[in-house]
Amino acid sequence: MGINKEFLEKALALLPTPAQQTVTVADTVTFSKNGLKITKHPAEDYRLRVLSRGDSICLDFGDHQVGYLHLKLRRVGGHSDAPVPLHIRFAEQPIEFFENPEDYRGAICSGWIQQEFLHVDLVPSELHMPRRYAFRYVKIEVSDISPSFKLAFDEIYCTAVSSADDTVLEPYSYNDELLCRLDKIACRTLHGCMQTVFEDGPKRDRRLWMGDLRLQAQANYETYKNNNLVKACLYLFAALPMPNGQISACLFLEPEIEADDFYMFDYALLYIPTLLDYYNATGDIDTVNELYNSAIKQIGIAEKWIGENGIVIDSEEVGWRFLDWTAELNKQAGSHGVLLYAIKKAIELAKITNDEHTVKLLADKHKKYRKAALDVLWDNDRQLFISGKERQVSFASQVWMVLGGAVEGETASKLLEQIKKQSDAIGMVTPYMYHNYIDALITAGDANKALEVIKSYFGGMAELGADTFWEIYNPENPDESPYGGTIVNSYCHAWSCAPAYFLRKYFSK
Amino acid sequence: MGINKEFLEKALALLPTPAQQTVTVADTVTFSKNGLKITKHPAEDYRLRVLSRGDSICLDFGDHQVGYLHLKLRRVGGHSDAPVPLHIRFAEQPIEFFENPEDYRGAICSGWIQQEFLHVDLVPSELHMPRRYAFRYVKIEVSDISPSFKLAFDEIYCTAVSSADDTVLEPYSYNDELLCRLDKIACRTLHGCMQTVFEDGPKRDRRLWMGDLRLQAQANYETYKNNNLVKACLYLFAALPMPNGQISACLFLEPEIEADDFYMFDYALLYIPTLLDYYNATGDIDTVNELYNSAIKQIGIAEKWIGENGIVIDSEEVGWRFLDWTAELNKQAGSHGVLLYAIKKAIELAKITNDEHTVKLLADKHKKYRKAALDVLWDNDRQLFISGKERQVSFASQVWMVLGGAVEGETASKLLEQIKKQSDAIGMVTPYMYHNYIDALITAGDANKALEVIKSYFGGMAELGADTFWEIYNPENPDESPYGGTIVNSYCHAWSCAPAYFLRKYFSK
């Protein structure tokens, strides 16, 4: 396909330079760990400390920050006659400090561990660290120091960056303290992820992912209303399709603008509802007209994976279908549900652009694939959708069938009750999947049940001290990491901003 | 005393900005170690290597360099989707690579270990490392890397810096290949140490020391002739005396100009011959006139430590007297010898400035302290000078008594033979002490013996692969470190440039 230069230029012209804000240290602290429980203790103000070899300070910036660290160093005693090696660690959550980076053996590159080994050649001096970090806590250890002098800090501060403007954020009010707290945490999550693009996580991977963008954009319309940022990202995806025209799964902006090289069946289709959501939030028909073709063609690309029975085939050939981080999840039914959902949303887009021919064509397709789902994937005995030749039962399958309109109303509501009773059902592990689950409950008319899920699932993270919502949260094992260490977990993750969207849209007074 | 601002301004105006030179990699190599023997092997050109996790390259810059490293990085494979942690080590001598920095437990600050742990956020990119290093070899290890891509280097080069101009260096010729080689190594040593000031070592401590300056200036007059650099340093020391007027042992230029806070008996006195040498090399009488008082007053300050017997007292009260790095060395006789030497040189300075009164005064002092040395420290049975109440016998004592003129001519020559026969004599460990030993042999009329010492001692380092001469060299234990690890040893050390001075002055054709 190549790059659509016109779209790319439009996108680049819209990309913001994140605003800067100076944030000072809120508290000097220490942490202790007893079993799984981590306790924060007040400590002597860092400005009063005089540090020798092996001494350290731990700083609390009061809330989750994304930005750059600055240190003003002073010496106590004789002349600084040797470089001072410092070990500086950044943590979104205190648990990260209780893992030794050297012990990390996970699959994901250890380059994501937020730490630096620096040399300060001269003291007094100012140290302006050039790399960006995501953190609430910073630990600075004096690895060694010449016996001639000791180290002290006159001031440590952070230049926080974001494209989310807190001054436009309207307060959320509801007669429930927990919900207000969840909204606040979700807004902070989105705030950290809104940079030059919508990043998936400001600690890691910092990329624009199509699947994450949809959820961030939804939360953005209810909160920071930086609609041009959504528009820029929509143009970026339209500008950089895969060779077959499929919307890319994720994009890099640096060192050069490039799409990653793998195909994602579900993420590509989710471009369609994202464009529709953008129109519904902004009424910007020009953008819809320009990006319409890029969106609609995703249906045809996905249809190549429909088998003779009218269902998305159960094969790795389809490419990566994310749905959730559960390794054992069979993704056939979920993928089919995503396709139905995308067709439903594409019909709305076609109506908006007065493309009557396509409206009819897509309506026929939806009818046909819906029927196939009910014929092939519906297990009448279990009253559930199954997936794959092993006839696997999962939350993901039911959720996407509901969102895709395979079942509706009372039937959908019953289905979402039915899945909860299955002891063999594959559960959900990511807030991304929970977002869609909550959406499905609301779609099925069960808003109150949706609210309960928000309270219990996101409330669980809040209970554990989340300042921002996490990439992964398994209530059974809060410190679980799919990567082999909490030090590479992303504790401020775009796809976890659901509460800000659902609460403000459906549960506000 | 405070700072003499006039002198300081003169000094600062004379300080050079070291010239820059781009140096490319000479060879890609590997090293192996068998017992004490290290062997260098050729390796595939670094530009052809494609590096995965744990891979490394080792570069040979062909000669000792002082400067900054630049890397042009390229990726092979997919987009760079995670920071690449690199471990970069610099070595003056290959032995340093065979020590694990983590095992270092020495007394000197580990901040001097020349290594960095860096993150490269994006590839392709250029990495311009901001800190200065002293090295011939660089080892770069890819500590980890995302499985999406591999790392390659398009180019690695160094911006070498020095205030020594190789174009003014006249070739040294003598009908002896070894001597030509020793001169070359000595010149390279001086070259590395000539920066904004004469540094003691460009790897570590990078400071202007009075004792080192004397020897560097001597070698400079015979080689790079950057006489203004000597002048600047003489003004710096005169500008920043200790509170009692004593010349400081060493100075820092950054982050602010300051003298270190300890007193050194011998180094302060050695300001006098350094000023005299400068005059003899340049004829710059104005500078001598300006700095004369600063120099001459060192005699009076040192005399406060003369005991009733006319000899420098044997006490720690005198402050640090360096002489050599031998812990067991008693420094009484050596200190007395340094005082005699300084007075001898001060007399010459006083003659140059036509200060007849001082000439006479100093001549009387020299006579008096020389007589005291012969009365109190001369052991007639052993035909040697002893030192301290334990009547210790050492090379240092005899050397400084010869340089100070306590004995002369045939007696001096016999004395320097006599000390070699003593099984209990404290030997010499630093090239600094060897420099004075060689000087004493020449003073005693034994130039040929001096040449043999140059050949055997400095030749020993050359034999072991020195590109520059070392801070410490003990022929009995070449890998000895007074600091607890070769990784903090300085292998390019100012006080080791003796061959360039002695060979060019006394042994050239």
Image (tube, coloured by chain):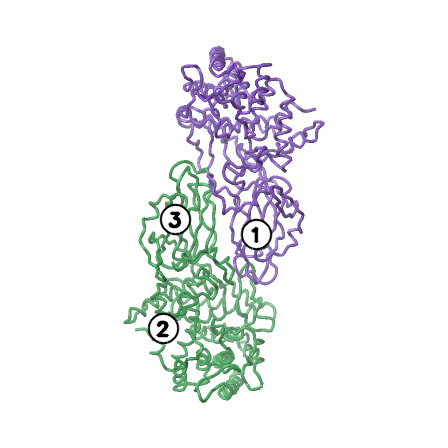
Chain colours: A green, B purple
What residue would you read off at disc 1?
A: B141
Identify which residue, B54 or A200, lies in the foreground: B54
Indicate the amino acid at tag 3: Ser
Chain letter for mark 2, please: A
* Amino acid tagged 1: Glu
Please determine if labels 3 and 1 lie on a single subunit: no
Q: Position of residue B484 (x, y in %)?
A: 50, 39
Rendered location of residue A314, percent (x, y): 55, 80
The residue identified by callout 3 is: A56
Q: Pinpoint residue A6: horizontal percent, then vertical percent.
A: 56, 67
Instruction: Answer left or right for A2 relative to A65.
Output: right
**Which quadrant of the rendered structure holds the C terminus of chain B?**
top right
Front position among marks 3 and 2: 3
Q: Determine which residue is flagged by label 2.
A: A454
Quarter of the picture containing the N terminus of chain B is top left
Mark sitting on residue B304: none
